[in-house]
Image (cartoon, coloured by chain):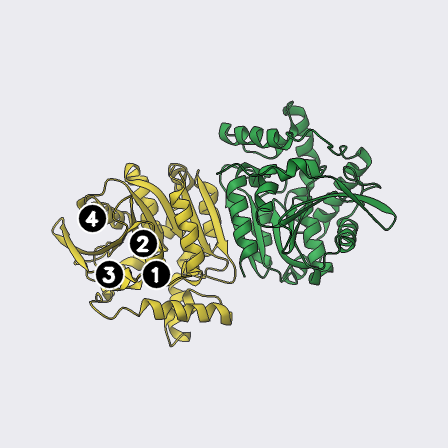
Chain colours: A yellow, B green
Amino acid sequence: MAELPDLHGSAITQFIEVGGNKYAYRIFGKETGLPLVFLHHFTATIDDWDPLVTNGLAQHFKVVLLDNKGIGASEGQAPDNVKGMADDATAVIGALGFTKVNLLGFSLGGFVAQQIALDSPELVNRLILAATSPKGGEGISNLPNIMNEAFATAPEDPRLFLFYSKSSESIARGRQSLARVKKRKENRVPPTSMPSIQAQVKSILGWAAENKNVYDELSRIKQPSLVVNGNNDIMFPTINSYTLFQHLPNARLSLYSDSGHGAIYQYADRFVKEAADFLETI
Amino acid sequence: MAELPDLHGSAITQFIEVGGNKYAYRIFGKETGLPLVFLHHFTATIDDWDPLVTNGLAQHFKVVLLDNKGIGASEGQAPDNVKGMADDATAVIGALGFTKVNLLGFSLGGFVAQQIALDSPELVNRLILAATSPKGGEGISNLPNIMNEAFATAPEDPRLFLFYSKSSESIARGRQSLARVKKRKENRVPPTSMPSIQAQVKSILGWAAENKNVYDELSRIKQPSLVVNGNNDIMFPTINSYTLFQHLPNARLSLYSDSGHGAIYQYADRFVKEAADFLETI
């Protein structure tokens, strides 16, 4: 694949004030067409997206990276529930002037994307739900143990433990992805604060504990959805992606081999191709 | 999509004698590169492939459609076990001079493809396993009841009941696929005989009843594999595709919305793109 222009690496960080809170975002890529709004995983900021994914999708779409409240360079404190996160993101998307968007939700960002689609269906054109789960998903409440194990066993970067399989190939691709993530040196945003991280954990565990009308809710998300994951996601177990696919009325499922939570980074080229193809389908 | 050359509609039926039995086959498409051998579903002959799939893949590969022993214009009586079917197909592939092939196994053909990969790993480059199941799959022994229901409720063509969802969109696409399948008028092969159909049922139920070392066997199929199906396959329930994916060491899974056993026909364009992309990956 030819080298892509590194729009990710040079995009300026912009700010918008919504409801008295300043939010950080970056926009790059195509100037026309529906924006593709990226909603990120637990702890991650706009600097933590793999540039191979953002630059790849920027060839096709206007890419919008957003730090939600209390994340990275965005002011405030992250809400301790997904509904609050969805409300914040929806308000920012509206304040940016967008009335219809595609959403790419990764992990916790996938919870937020589902909630936005439920609460503001008119705002959402299509959904990409990567390494995520419906409410009440299996094995998600085990997350604190998995995090502890990651910090205990992966000195280099916990994502190498959490996002990849145990194979040397998967780990090598994880290292490559992390190198890409860390390549941008200028004007990085601060890491997410500990209180916001704690609120995110509470949000994730709250989502996992919900068990009322879960499938009814999913049946109301009519947008075409692409559900993607690795074959062995140890954070939000892969069976949850299958369940999500089975209960969304208009979804397709794509699962990759020898991979985990970070499958869209491990197979960034393939994912970009698949996501662009999905979003460009009339 | 531009109209494809209808190689499927004009391909001559050829015959080859192997082990004293005459087998019918058709070859068309690219002259070079690894052949893509199509292994068909319960009762189906070389005339029952959807030309949108065969013509589409013929743009990329040398397509080989094969009627196994006792099917269509091939002489003899179908074996009553998958192992026997795999032995026959392997012998014919060898007699045609092919030492390495890609296999596309649809339903029962997917059982045969798995068995060939197990018994003759050196022959198989990559596998596409559509609407199929590992040995001992869930719900497969219910097939006779499903067949009875199909014949009782679908006067037009049982495949409209068996291969598609209950939505008007899926049924409409099923009708379009059947019209394509029936378009070729010249030199069609005879339908499969009742004794061979009975042997196929016995093969399917035998496969479903196997429960020893199933996952060990799958772990030995190292070839890259693409597992595809609809979200609600009532013949070989979709969860079997997930299980197959999870136990093959190098597989990817692609499941389509609002579809069943015939998903690769319902979404023929998408499937052709995905299959070609998969087979062409280095």
Q: Amino acid at mark 2?
A: Ala
Query: Mark 1 — on which chain does it sit?
Result: A
- Identify which residue is drawn at 68% across, 54% down: B114
Foreground tag (3 vs 1): 1
Q: Amino acid at mark 1?
A: Leu
Residue labelled with disc 1? A4
The first of marks 3 and 4 along the sequence is 4
Q: CA distance from mark 3 to mark 1?
A: 34 Å
Q: Do marks 2 and 4 share a subunit?
A: yes
Foreground tag (2 vs 3): 2
Q: Are marks 1 and 2 in contact (CB under 8 Å)?
A: yes
Residue labelled with disc 4? A92
Examine the rendered structure and indicate whether residue B258 appears above or below residue A170.
above
Quadrant (top left, top right, bottom left, bottom right) of the N terminus of chain A: bottom left
Residue labelled with disc 2? A58
Examine the rendered structure and indicate whether residue A160 appears above or below residue A5.
below
The first of marks 4 and 1 along the sequence is 1
